[in-house]
Image (spheres, rainbow, N blue to C red):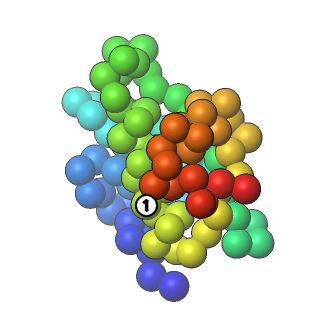
Amino acid sequence: MTHPNPAGSTTNGFRDNAAGNRFELEIDGLVAFADYRRRDGLLIVTHVEAPVPLRGTGAADRLMRAVAETARAEGLSIRPLCGYAAGWLRTHREFRDLAV
């Protein structure tokens, strides 16, 4: 299956750092990230973090939206082990169907 953001590519600062098992969103030289594992049709999101200067700017929201869009494009469900990721999926109805 073709990945919408192959390792190292960027779309609006978003990239899949497959070697590091994390999605990254670079904004003004700072990187918000979501650590993940892929297993059995699941994208397991273990941790989401934004650097302090990006907190409150919507960076983590944009990151999670890109993660959810990537999961949908790859036909994966999301298992959020991180509180932020779980809360984000609960409040974004258009992606709730991805959560397991």
Q: Quadrant of residue 98?
A: bottom right
Where's the C terminus, which quadrant? bottom right
Residue 7: in sight, yes or no? no
The image position of residue 66, as x and y in percent, is: 40, 52
The image position of residue 43, as x and y in percent, is: 65, 59
Furthest-front residue in this view: 93
The image position of residue 47, as x and y in percent, is: 64, 36
Q: Is 5 above or below relative to 46? A: below
The image position of residue 79, as x and y in percent, is: 71, 52
In this rendering, would 8 be left or right of 78? left
Residue at x 75% of width, y 66% of height: 39
Q: Is 97 above or below relative to 73? A: above
Q: Which residue is mark 1?
A: 69
Q: Count every numbered label the image shows and give the total.
A: 1
Q: Quadrant of residue 69?
A: bottom left
**Crowding at mark 1 (Cα within 10 Å: few <14, some 14-19, many 20+):** some
Q: Is 86 above or below relative to 66? A: above
Residue at x 46% of width, y 63% of height: 70
In this rendering, would 93 be left or right of 87? left
Q: Nearer the viewer, residue 34 or 75?
A: 75
Residue at x 51% of width, y 85% of height: 1
Furthest-right residue in this view: 40
Callout 1 secondary element = helix
Residue at x 38% of width, y 71% of height: 4
Residue 87: in sight, yes or no? yes
